[in-house]
Image: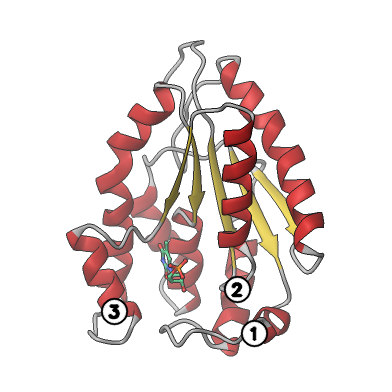
Amino acid sequence: MDASNESRGALVVFEGLDRSGKTSQCGRLLSYLEGLGHSIELWRFPDRTTSVGKMISAYLSNESQLDDHTIHLLFSANRWEKRSMMEMKLKAGTTLIVDRYSYSGVAFSSAKGLDFEWCKAPEIGLIAPDLVLYLEIPPEKAAERGGYGGERYEQLKFQKKVAQHYKLLEDSSWKIIDASQSMEDVEKQVKETVSEHVLSCQKGKALSSLWS
Ligand code: TMP
């Protein structure tokens, strides 16, 4: 997608089941990298602030009903509407920490029974992350963590299926972190892994696209 050797920000994605600790770890990583003087932003998907995001939010809180294919495409559209901004920020040297991305899109929708390749198709051409931190936790343990918040997908049986589907998406950009460790131990591993990747992007690693 981009053969230049220019310094850029890194695209770091957190993935995992609901209650795996992604959001806390994103916040901790943000403070750490800011403290080192990096230009950095925290993003999340779904981005519920856009008009597409509002439709997704209503669906997740069971205020609206949508066909499974339709909601899948809305999640994807929600990433596409941010794609050019994402590219601009990365090229301008800002590292983006992103709480959920295309892997959530495919794992959750295919766990409902939609065809796996069909689920991947609308994600093709989005920017490929430099690093995916997958916070791995047994679904039973995640369910014990303060209980689920009542959104549509927060059910143990479904989360078990999602975990299986995530596994099918693992590639060389993934680092699997045992999220049943203490927050501090997880944080330490996250920091070590991310620092290496930020450096390689500063040295001019080219941007690439999903899933090519
Ligand atoms: P959140 O709790 O991280 O805001 O995510 C909301 C829910 O939406 C969560 O259960 C995962 C699910 N999800 C999808 O089904 N597809 C997607 O593309 C994304 C980003 C999230």
Residue drawn at (31%, 87%), measured in percent from left and top?
62
Q: Residue 207: give its label.
A: none
Residue drawn at (62%, 34%), measured in percent from left and top?
35
78 shown above or below 131? below
Amino acid marked by disc 1: Ala
34 shown above or below 28? above
CA gap between label 3 and label 2 equals: 19 Å
Can you tell which quarter of the image residue 60 is in? bottom left
Ligand 1 is found in the corner quadrant, namely: bottom left
Q: Give whichever of 79, 85 is nearer the camera.
A: 85
CA gap between label 1 and label 3 equals: 21 Å
Can residue 170 be seen here? The reply is no
Give the residue number, with chain letter if any, for mark 3: 59
Classify residue 189 as left or right of residue 25.
right
Picture coordinates of residue 110 (x, y %)?
A: 46, 71
Give the residue number, with chain letter if any, for mark 1: 143
**For marks 1 and 3 on the same chain, the one whose residue lies earlier in the sequence:** 3
120 shown above or below 201? below
Give the residue number, with chain letter if any, for mark 2: 19
Q: Give whichever of 75, 39 is nearer the camera.
A: 39
**Residue contact at pointers 3 and 2, CB within 8 angstroms:** no
CA gap between label 1 and label 2 equals: 7 Å
